[in-house]
Image (spheres, grey):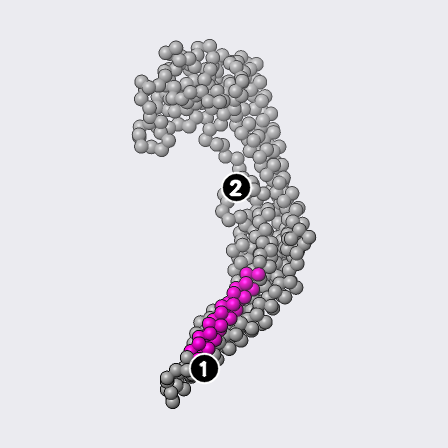
Amino acid sequence: MSPSDSSILNGETALESFWEIGQYKRSVRRIEDAPRLCSELSLLIRERSEIEAAYAKSLQQWSKKWSEHVDKGVEYGSAQEAWKAILHEGRSKADLHLQRRDRLIDEVFNVIKIWSKDNFHKTAFGAVKEGKEIEEAFKRAQKPWAKLYGKILKAKREYFSSSRMERSAENQEKNAAGNPEMSREQVKKFHEKMVKCQTERQKAEEEYRKTVSAIFDYKSTYQADMMQVFKRCQELELKRLKFFKEMLKGAHDCLNMLNSIYEQFLSTVTSVDAEKDVQNWEKEFGPGMPFNCPVFETYTPEVREIVKKRNKVAGDEPVVLLSKRESIADPNADNCLVEPLDDKSKMTNSSDVTTHCIDEWDESGDIFEKLGDEDEQGWCKGRKDGITGLYPANYAVDLKA
């Protein structure tokens, strides 16, 4: 389901809910991201071990250089021993950093690599096998719902379309009945068309209500099937988060030389709450998101509806126009068209053609102002008595011509 389809059904879209078609992919992506996170954490640990080794090497070089200098120097007695004490501290600290390096590699880096290899596997095409399995399970759980959802979208489009046709037919019948130039037979045809459109609208509305009822009845089954698959995602993610917490605490133990330095580090790692993390994720991106079950929506007519074919000629079915009225009293009003009259053409209704625009230019011989050229559908914008609307281009003649 595309965002536009969702907006058709629910009226608006923000962050797509877990329950919407295809939105389970966020949950699948968590599983697919896990091997990459393992690689990134192991790289982080390896780089830190390299820093420890580099620092140890620098301390060793520093200690060796100055030990030779002190031994050959002019300092003597107890003062010379004090010099050697700080050099001994450097050698001892270098050994300690090398121990850090070895423990980080053996107790953290290698363990992460083994755990990742045991828990995540690649398919022949390089995808994460566990992620593909979860995705297929979600697809199976969502397939019946998606099928019902597609029927709703189709039924709704047909219902809205037939409602527009019915409204158009009613307006045409009304205009024809009030037109003295229309024969009784012509008025009868318009009435028959209106009755037919009304029947089609009623049929479409009944089908729409039926599909909405069907998807509502299936709602509980759909939710149960999706939750079953989602729990598998949660279990895998919970396992990964707990393992990462264990590894980071292990890194702390490897690096904990001075408690005062690493006290905050330990506090931060210890405060990791894997259970709370997955629960919050469920609320924000999983089944805890709002469930917007489709409901029946009553048709509401648009601001303007035009039923016209470009190639129709005078004498074909009349055009129904619901014009958008805009006052020209306030020059600062939004979308208000105020152009000087002398810059526009003056038009008049052709006496041999009848227009059927509601409340506007409905008498032959009326003079009004042309505001724009003919568009690709054969309509022009005009203004009369402060009212802006559309009129068929071939229904009027230019007085300047």
In this figure, which residue is indicated by the disc labeled 2? Answer: 7
Q: What is the x, y in percent for residue 331? A: 31, 30
In front of the other: 375 or 205: 375
Taking 89 as reference, is 115 left or right? right
Identify the mark nearer the N-term, 1 or 2.
Answer: 2
SS assignment at label 2: helix
Taking 52 as reference, is 197 left or right? right
In this figure, which residue is indicated by the disc labeled 1? Answer: 88
Taking 258 as reference, is 341 left or right? left
Please indicate, yes or no, whether residue 103 appears anywhere in the rendered image.
Answer: yes
| Quadrant of the rendered image containing residue 65 | bottom left
User: Do the numbered discs 1 and 2 sit on residues whose CB atoms are within 8 Å?
Assistant: no
Numbered tag placed on residue 123 in the rendering: none
Q: Does the magenta stretch include residue 50?
A: yes
Please indicate, yes or no, whether residue 41 appears anywhere in the rendered image.
Answer: no
Query: Which region of the structure is painted magenta?
Result: 39-68
The residue sitting at the right extreme is 124
Q: What is the x, y in percent for residue 258? A: 45, 77
Q: Is residue 398 magenta?
A: no
| Residue at 63% in and 66% down | 114
Q: What is the x, y in percent for residue 214? A: 64, 44
| Residue at 46% in and 77% down | 64
